[in-house]
Amino acid sequence: MSAAINKIGFIGIGNMGWHMAANLVKAGFDVSVFDADPMRADEFCAKHKAAAPSLAELALCEVIVCMLPTGPIVRSALLEAEQGAFINNARAGTIVIDMSSSEPTGTRELCAILKEKNITLIDAPVSGAVPRATIATLTIMIGGDDAAVIETVKPVLMAMGNRLFETGGSGCGHAAKALNNYLGATAFAATSEAVQIAKRFGLDPHTLVDILNVSTGKSFISEVVMKEHVLEEKYASGFKLGLLAKDVKIAEGLGQAVKLDAPLLRLVNERWALACERIGYDADNTEAYKGWQDDL
């Protein structure tokens, strides 16, 4: 563990955040947690011997990690919650690591606001979902304007992941996460269509997926997701449909921000928005398959 960092505040003890914060405790950091659900924070503390102070007290930690559903919620937690408890109590030199899936342009705006208080924001979203969060093997995409601060927080990040990528300036980590999830969402949508067409034609979907996995149609979706979660109807990948739809929308917004015409991205965004509307935000993302099956 880095001698420079000891006290870490963790905001957001959800499905991912619980395991990530637990791994920080296991790594020897002094961890305090805060969650919108105080009972969940208390439960975490009872199990992992952490503390659950007020947001104002948590703001005094050297490093604050945010693992929240959206960028606006991150912004609210840091600037608005409890009458601005964090921003009004954080000390100069505090480092905030936003590991949520936030909008890259919003990240740059928040970075500028925090910089006025001499607080450094690093964006470090993750890939790997709950299984890899549990065993601290997440892929972490790091964006930030201060290379020295990034080096300082690497021991914190390495307690939660084993693949760290420095992506560039502020917001670049969040951009990488959104673009990765857009491609994953595209592969899932395309594979779902292929499987549904195969079923209607009389081609066994399991056979088709076996063929894909030794042919040019192979992807993470065909190898890992399609048989286990869709064809076997488990629908339990551990990542909400609404969150993936949100990430695709972030990617589309990023394309607009850089003034790039991306027609496929627009279409994929529409497909996931439709699935979310039909199946529900809290459904597993693999259940999108059911939301599209009547469209062909």
Image (cartoon, grey):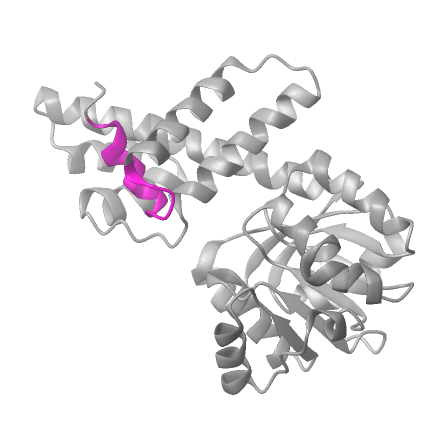
Numbered disc total = 0
* Residue 291 pos. (x, y %): 26, 32
Magenta residues span 279-293
| Residue shown at 64% from the left, 19% from the top | 256
| Residue 257: % across, % down | 69, 22
Name the quarter where the C terminus is drawn. top left
- Compared to residue 4, the image places residue 107 above or below, namely above
What's the residue at 65%, 42% (across, down)? Answer: 174
Q: Nearer the viewer, residue 233 or 212?
A: 233
Most foreground residue, 165 or 56? 56
Between 127 and 285, the one lying in front of the other is 285
Q: Is residue 291 magenta-colored?
A: yes
Residue 8, image x, y percentages: 72, 72
Q: Is residue 42 magenta?
A: no
Question: Within the image, what quadrant is residue 103 found in?
Answer: top right
> Which of the image's four quarters has the N terminus?
bottom right
Is residue 153 depicted above or below 225 in this figure? below
Task: Name the residue at the left extreme.
Answer: 202
- Say whether residue 201 is left or right of residue 150: left
Q: Is residue 239 visible in the rendered structure shown here?
A: yes
Q: 41 above or below 227? A: below
Residue 101 as seen in the image, left or right of residue 275: right
Q: With 267 as the anchor, is 233 left or right in this view?
A: left
User: Going 24% across and 43% down the picture, which residue do you hit?
Assistant: 230
Which residue of the protein is positioned furthest toward the front in this rendering?
Answer: 83
Residue 205 spot, x, y in % from top left: 16, 33
